[in-house]
Amino acid sequence: MKPFLSICMIVKDEEKVLKRCLESICGIADEIIIADTGSIDKSKEIAAKYTDMVFDYKWEGDFSKARNFAASKASGDWILVIDADEFVDRENFMAFKDDLKLNPPDFNILAVQIVNFVGQNGKDTALNFHERLYINDGKISYYRNIHELLKHRDSKESKGYSKFQIYHSGYMKNVVNEKEKSKRNLKLLINNKVKEPIDYYFMGNEYDQLDELDKAIKCYQKAYKLKDDINRDWVKKLLLRFVNTLHRAKRDNEALEIIDSCENIYPGLVDFKFYRGKIYFDNEQFRKSGEVFEKILAEKHHLIADSSPDFLEFLPNKYLGEIYENENRLHLAVKSYSKALSINDTDDYIWIRLIGLLSKHSTLEELSEFLNNNLLNKSNITVKRVISILLSVPNLDVQKLTRSLLEDENLTELENEGLFLRNLLLDGDTDEILTIINQKSESEIFTLLSTGIFNIIDFIILILKTNNEGYKKIIHSIKFNKPINNLLLLLLEEKKSNLSVFEQELFLLIYKQSYILGASLVIEQLETKVPYLSRENRNKLNKIRSGKII
């Protein structure tokens, strides 16, 4: 029988995610075609377990050519394109395929919704549509070397949208760093001899991802200037990205001017309203910010989200919780935090703020009961995550509640040892910590710190407490994802150093935990280094000193 639905993929060195993708589509797709562009890992070996249609393809720096090569091997009535770092819900995929058979669309090209998991751990989502489904009649193919689009060779394309969703994890922050996708994408875009307006939009996105904000802004400005129609979907997305990038570049007046115009053009879109509230919030204009977020919640059933569904309810509640807390409207703060967590309980920051707030106005017994009923009994929250949340609450008594989790069967021996050491530090028992650590080799200390329970911040505080030269050598030898050499020289060697943004953030975390511990001698040492902080971070330090330390 002739296949109905062909899945076409291009793959290179995707052994970490390929199995997840293929498991989600196998048995539902009628055939799976994979064009491998030069894998040196186990990608081809994994692919061969799911399909016998794996082909070698010499990469030419052009995604469209590779996709069209894979499509040339397909024999299904329809082609669906999916990438290795994507996956589908099998039940929805089956329903989608059945509906495609029974109710064929009036279009020959359809865009599907891509749900992108973004951020450090993929806890946030962003949405976009991409042309992935098309009739396999030999007349439709991809063009553009990157950010590919479909066209009919006789210009007879008819384009629509499908409700089908594909889940994409490729833009989680750690994955982006590993694969350097932005640098790769940017190189391909720059090498295009003839650039369309949308190319400058895509270039802006890549510069934005690389934190080259001025270049991103110039690209967005050029793309907008060259646009041929303000109603194109990518122009709306450009304006949203433009606003966010201007805000990150601290050019808020320009961002707000764009928002003023766009709220009139897109009155039913929540995104621009949300960014207005966030800009006010980040500038500590809490009353104005609160009014925006309260209005969003009041109108949420009449608004739609383009960038993220979180803009409609989850994030407004999250920000309102903090606003109400700042205004000492504690009942409303608890209500907003709780509502946000009922929508998405993966955001540890909200748990930390809620528990921190409750700790100020509840007894330890009441707080323990709350944790047992609302945090410790959740199947999706691991013991280690509970520990991480509690140890991040800026309250010594709350952090000490982790003692009840010592020897938990779900902790490894190393994690349990880290928790034991962390509680010794909370008790101020430096001598016992030294007794344990002095028995360890340098590599064993590295491994212990890698659990993140007794962590780098704790180790630096220990060094500042003891002035141990051996520990100084150990921490200098550790290779961090982001270098902290200047911070270590400043804190441990008394050498003047310019601190990076990351190093200043780490300094604040060290100061905050020292404040929580009541480590007065350490704080005295840190106070002498405050002039090396930016004005913004000195203001944050003042909040820690005044007790507003989350």
Image: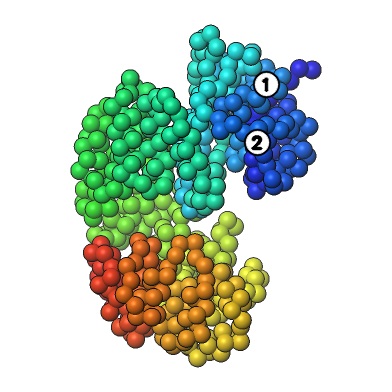
The circle on residue 37 is: 2
Q: How would you rate the neighbour count of disc 1 (Cα within 10 Å): few for under 14, some for 14-19, many for 20 or more? A: some
- 316 relative to 496, above or below: above
Q: Please identify the quarter of the rendering in which residue 68 is found.
A: top right
- 467 relative to 68, above or below: below
Q: Can residue 372 be seen in this view?
A: no
Closest to the observer, 284 or 255: 255
Q: Please identify the quarter of the rendering in which residue 213 is found.
A: top left
The disc, 2 or 1, on the residue closer to the chain's N-terminal end is 2
Residue 342: percent from left, percent from top: 46, 51
Residue type indicated by callout 2: Thr
Q: Please identify the quarter of the rendering in which residue 542 is found.
A: bottom left
Mark-to-mark CA distance, 2 and 1: 15 Å
The residue shown at (64%, 44%) is 14
Q: How would you rate the neighbour count of disc 2 (Cα within 10 Å): few for under 14, some for 14-19, many for 20 or more? A: some
The residue shown at (28%, 70%) is 532
Residue under pointer 1: 72
Q: Is residue 103 left or right of residue 312?
A: right
Where does the C terminus fall, quadrant-wise? Answer: bottom left
Residue 362: percent from left, percent from top: 38, 71
Closest to the observer, 11 or 512: 11
Where does the N terminus fall, quadrant-wise? Answer: top right
The residue shown at (41%, 29%) is 199
